[in-house]
């Protein structure tokens, strides 16, 4: 069974031969560990083509990861304290709605380079499942308007907020169309919606203001025959049913924060989880044995005999190398 088939079977609950594996490595971890980390990653039979991609040159880091101040393509100014760790936006192009009419929306050209894997890519005898894009909406709205201004607007609901939402949606749909020109297997969306305790906004506001946006974006992907992947940090239990209802096939969320028993009871078997292992406690501070036990607990709560999990744990610079090794060793030997 090649990687593409293995991932597809896991997503659609059609009995993969093993749990597929996905890398998630922060640039700061690559900077800190260098060849020692690369050696670990190269030994892993990863199913999304990571090992076929060239390492990102530091000079090519996006503005969010470059140390110091830098503008991104939307003309948001970012400040990054440490190279390779996502910084914070400090200057916003539409901090006043008076600037909205004159704002020049960026034109991005989606032309996957030779190192970008898509569905037709085969390396030797190995064909990979390929994910394209990383499209945000709520976060991009904040980066245009400012976090405080966005949150206040969502409570007051001025007409200008709806106008900005619709302009951003139009831009996002056009951007998505470029990704859909390529033969990817799945398209990735991401917005961090939760705090440690709850959703950032009332779920009713989320459903009335943001759910119609996601529905249009997801419908395009589904109509193209691709899987919808969605990432969100925080306590998002209230909107997971909505995401599933809109056709999301893979969710990457903090299941330990939400509660493993809750997730098992309500969502196991209904959606595939790209696992987000506990990166607040277990991965950085646990022993290798505790990492192994944690993985078994997570997999047994989320997976089914037919599939439903993609093995993944985010690697940051605070994760010890011995825990990274233990994580991948457990991934490789785990049986449903």
Image: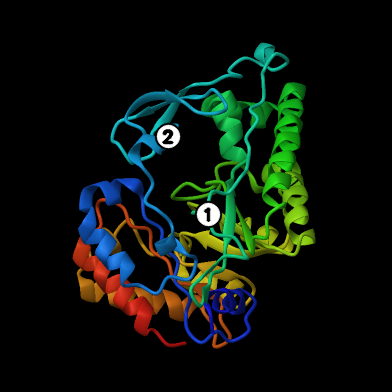
State whether residue 170 is above or below residue 193: above
Q: Does the CB distance between marks 2 and 1 fall below 8 Å? A: no
Question: In the image, 23: left or right of 67?
Answer: right
Q: Nearer the viewer, mark 2 or mark 1?
A: 1
Res 250 seen here: yes
Question: In the image, 69: left or right of 146?
Answer: left
Residue depicted at 55% across the width and 79% down the height? 6
Separation of marks 2 and 1 at Cα, in angstroms = 21 Å
Quarter of the picture containing the N terminus is: bottom right
Q: Which residue is mark 2?
A: 64
Q: Position of residue 178 (x, y in %)?
A: 70, 45
Q: Nearer the viewer, residue 166 or 153?
A: 166
Res 291 seen here: no
Q: Position of residue 129 (x, y in %)?
A: 56, 68
Question: In the image, 215: left or right of 73?
Answer: right
- What numbered label is drawn on residue 116? 1
Question: In the image, 87: left or right of 37?
Answer: right
Residue depicted at 67% across the width and 49% down the height? 179
Q: Position of residue 327 (x, y in %)?
A: 31, 71
Q: Position of residue 141 (x, y in %)?
A: 61, 32
Disc with the residue nearer the chain's start (2 vs 1): 2
Task: Give the class, few, some or many, for how many residues have Cα within 10 Å of label 2's Cα (few <14, many ≥20).
Answer: many
State whether residue 219 is above or below residue 178: below
């Amino acid at each position: 069974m090649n990687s593409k088939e293995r991932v597809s079977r896991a997503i659609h609950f059609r009995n993969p031969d093993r749990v597929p594996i996905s890398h998630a490595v922060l640039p700061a971890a690559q900077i800190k560990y260098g060849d020692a980390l690369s050696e670990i990653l190269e030994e892993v039979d990863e199913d999304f083509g990571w090992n076929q991609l060239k390492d990102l040159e530091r000079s090519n880091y996006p503005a969010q990861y470059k140390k110091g101040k830098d503008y991104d393509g939307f003309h948001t100014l970012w400040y990054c304290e440490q190279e390779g760790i996502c910084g914070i936006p400090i200057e916003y192009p539409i901090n006043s709605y008076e600037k909205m009419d004159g704002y020049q929306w960026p034109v991005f050209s989606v032309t996957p380079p030779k190192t970008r894997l898509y569905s037709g890519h085969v390396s030797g005898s190995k064909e990979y499942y390929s994910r394209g894009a990383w499209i945000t909406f709520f976060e991009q709205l904040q980066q245009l308007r400012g976090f405080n201004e966005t949150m206040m607007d969502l409570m007051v609901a001025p007409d200008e907020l709806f106008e900005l939402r619709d302009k951003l949606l139009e831009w996002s749909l056009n951007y998505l169309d470029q990704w859909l020109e390529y033969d990817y297997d799945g398209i990735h969306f991401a917005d961090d919606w939760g705090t440690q305790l709850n959703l950032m906004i009332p779920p009713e506001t989320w459903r009335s203001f943001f759910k119609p946006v996601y529905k249009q974006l997801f419908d395009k992907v589904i109509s193209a025959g691709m899987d919808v992947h969605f990432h969100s940090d925080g306590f998002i239990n209230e909107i997971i049913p909505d995401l599933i209802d809109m056709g999301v096939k893979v969710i990457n969320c903090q299941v330990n924060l939400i509660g493993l028993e809750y997730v098992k009871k309500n969502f196991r078997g209904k959606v595939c989880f790209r696992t987000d292992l506990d990166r607040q406690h277990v991965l950085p501070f646990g022993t290798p044995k505790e990492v192994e036990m944690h993985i078994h607990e997570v997999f047994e709560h989320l997976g089914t005999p037919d599939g439903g999990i993609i093995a993944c744990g985010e690697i940051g610079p605070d994760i010890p190398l011995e825990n990274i090794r233990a994580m991948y060793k457990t991934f490789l030997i785990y049986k449903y």
